[in-house]
Amino acid sequence: MATDHQIPASKQQQPGSSAFKLVIYEQENFQGRCHELTGPCNNLQEAGVEKVGSILVLCGPWVGYEQASCKGEQYVFEKGEYPRWDSWTNSRRSDTIVAFRPIKVDSQEHKIVLYENPSFAGKKIEIIDDDVPSFHAHGYQEKVSSVRVQSGTWVGYQYPGYRGFQYLFEKGEYKDSGEFGAQIPQIQSVRRIRDMQWHQRGAFHPVN
């Protein structure tokens, strides 16, 4: 639900607080009507948001979805400014965001294992406390059909260099590609989602 109230500064600064804050602007470059979110919103249109043109994340991270009720293509946002559509995605399949929810980041450690076949079978690539812009460069050229996240929160990308469709991986198991929202089992890069609470230099800055 879009709100007008502000989170007290004292709460924003408390380490470990669950404060989240995101501002949606209906036009590019932070112009037009704006709407503030401090929690999940399953349908922006019902909350009075006609269009998402630019986004300012004051306290995050967040994930946006192409469809209502947190379905469809995913877009991950960390603390920072996103003045237009191509600053948060280059997949070009859709130009709509209809839902948002905060992403809980509660671990300083990161470990993820990605498997070639469903149900954690076949060849695998294990990543610990690192970002990997190209699986091919690490000798892994197989598809990714299932994933185990043992710690941390991650975002996988369809192509190398953090491009293409995005897939959010929170702690847990994903037995097949449908469970993480992929139409085809293809992931070729992955990075950690980091929060300023845990990583002082953790904000992600997309390359223009």
Image (tube, rainbow, N blue to C red):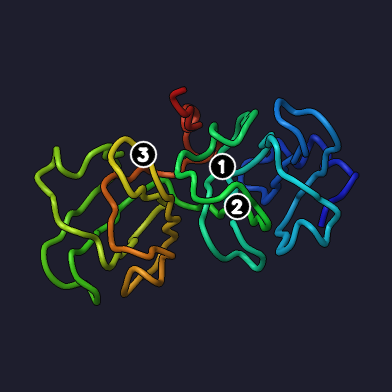
| Quadrant in which the N terminus appears | bottom right
Up/down of 176 relative to 128, above or below: below
Question: Mark 2 or mark 3, which has the lower sequence index?
Answer: 2
Q: Which residue is mark 1?
A: 77
Residue at left offset 83%, top offset 57%: 47
Give yes or no for contact between labels 2 and 3 (Cβ–Cβ under 8 Å): no
Dot 2 and dot 1 residues touching (CB under 8 Å): yes
Q: Using the image as rendered, state which of residue 163 and residue 61 is in the foreground.
A: 163
Provide the secondary structure element on which disc 3 rests.
loop
Query: For residue 171, what is the image quadrant?
Result: bottom left
The answer for how far apart the CA atoms under marks 2 and 3 are is 17 Å
Q: Amino acid at mark 3?
A: Tyr
Query: Residue under circle 3?
Result: 162
Q: Earlier in the sequence, mark 3 or mark 1?
A: 1
Marks 3/1: CA–CA distance: 13 Å
| Disc 2 target residue | 64
Residue 179 lies, in percent from the top left, at 41, 71
Q: Secondary structure at mark 2?
A: strand
**Residue 201, x across and y down, in percent:** 47, 27
Q: Residue 10 lies in what quarter of the image?
A: top right
Left or right of 149 in this view: 20: right
The Cα–Cα distance between marks 2 and 1, rounded to whole angstroms, is 8 Å
Q: Nearer the viewer, mark 3 or mark 1?
A: 3
